[in-house]
Amino acid sequence: MNALKLQTSGNSGTLSKYLFIFTHEVGDIEFYPTYSRLVKSQWKPYEELKAEQEKQLRNIIYYSYYNIPYYHRLFDSLGLKPESIRTIEDLQKLPILTKSVIRENWEDFKPLHLNRMKYQEETTGGSTGTPFKYRITSHDRFLSGAILYRGWGYGGYQLGDKTIFLAGTSLGVGPKPYLVKRFHEIARNLRKFSSFDMDDKGMRQFVSVMNTFKPKFLRGYASSIYFFARWLEENDLKVHQPMSVFTTSEKLYPQMREKISKVFGCDVYDGYGLNDDGVTAFECSEHRGMHIYTERSIAEVVDEDGNQLDHGEGRIVGTSLHNYAMPFLRYDTGDIGNLLEEECPCGRGYKLLKEICGRSGDILITPEGKAINSLFFATIFDEIMSVREYQIVQEKLDRIVVRISTGRDFDQKQLQDIVRLIKARSQGWNIEFDIVDRIEKTRAGKYKYVINKVMSEQSHGKLSAFPSS
């Protein structure tokens, strides 16, 4: 076993670390060598990382043309051959790939020799309302894990460290047979709690487990950890202090980061990852932005015409480099990111995402044509402690519904304050309120702060990247 080659340092000789590595190498014997290589490769200069990316890009392009019927037909229709795409810049010769295109051509996305591959079918969480199905090879899945653990290492994580999850199905939290769940928890030294069980009883149970299990790290949906932090503060309860908190899957607003850090007494490390196209980015201890990893995918930030940006805000487009069961070439993630020009002082060679600005549906459009980022609403409701949860739904261009779950202290004056602040951005909006007990989560257990039904209806048109307002 490759784990026998481990060097002893710190807690690396513990049983939990050996068991953790062994469990992963049962699935992929190259897991630990791959992880070790990745830990070293993060310090390479960007030019070297890019050259390695482009070498793998040429491989996946060649494979896609000769093995995936859809891509063969697409290239021929554009007058392209595999040798036409040799660099990251050359990807601009290809159109943006959307979920709807994949669904409409599902059979033509199957490789000619799919039956010879070791792969599995996955689905996304369906945050847009419709889960999306895709295939992923076993090798790419374990590569994803190795990259994930390297990213956690920015916050001090070492393989096998105690970790607790507070999330939903997109992070593997959900109903499983008891023995399967217990084996997974013991082998990987973790515990998982569902974001669907965040009532008073569920959170008290979570407190109990945190204080007995004593995890070194807490990971989960940004909104779930934020709600838990607020609940702890409101109930004046203390939990075991982790070394770091890792947030993911949702936008982490500044107020959320501040609250989580204050309540848990540690740094918060934000991350971004998509398993379907492999785009991954992690924040290091400098907190200057998220390092965009190059080893598993190519991430482009593009303007509304699909042209690559050197810096600034645009749509994130991903190309998978190792998933031969279903290669994604210039796949539209639906996410909007802000690409930085500067390098991180930590010394890693990756480019930086200043932030994930949200999904295209997280931005509301006023009748006057202004784009309003979801951060605007966060600044309103984070100041009103008697609003436990909120959700803004744009039903029409001139109509928004403000859905809120309130505490006992909420009154008519606060309602009027909310209307006044929203109207300051657009007098053209008709505002309706819906007072509810709880805000419904997505199928994956995530929490949507903003839902733009107008944008969803127009999503089949041109790519758009709206600025924050």
Image (spheres, grey):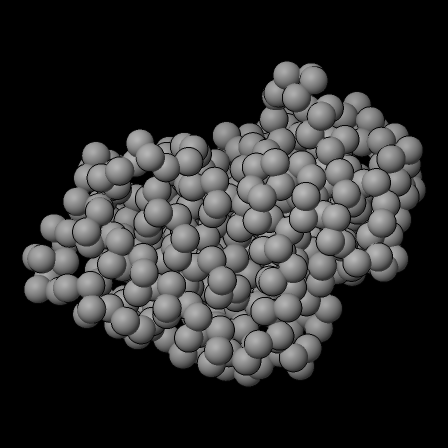
Left or right of 348 on screen, residue 286:
right
In the rendering, at what x and y percent does residue 236 appear? 91, 41
In the rendering, at what x and y percent does residue 38 appear? 60, 62
Instruction: Please report the residue visible at 68 percent of the width from the left and 67 percent of the height from the top.
Output: 284
In the rendering, at what x and y percent does residue 90 appear? 26, 72
In the rendering, at what x and y percent does residue 434 appear? 53, 33
Q: Is residue 216 above or below residue 435?
A: below
Left or right of 68 on screen, residue 231:
right
Q: Quadrant of residue 204?
A: top right
Q: Is residue 56 above or below residue 244?
A: below
**As rendered, which of 125 and 56 lies closer to the eye?**
56
Q: Is residue 53 visible?
A: yes
Q: Is residue 200 above or below residue 311?
A: above
Instruction: Please report the residue visible at 84 percent of the width from the left and 57 percent of the height from the top.
Output: 8
Q: Is residue 377 visible?
A: no
Left or right of 92 on screen, residue 386:
right
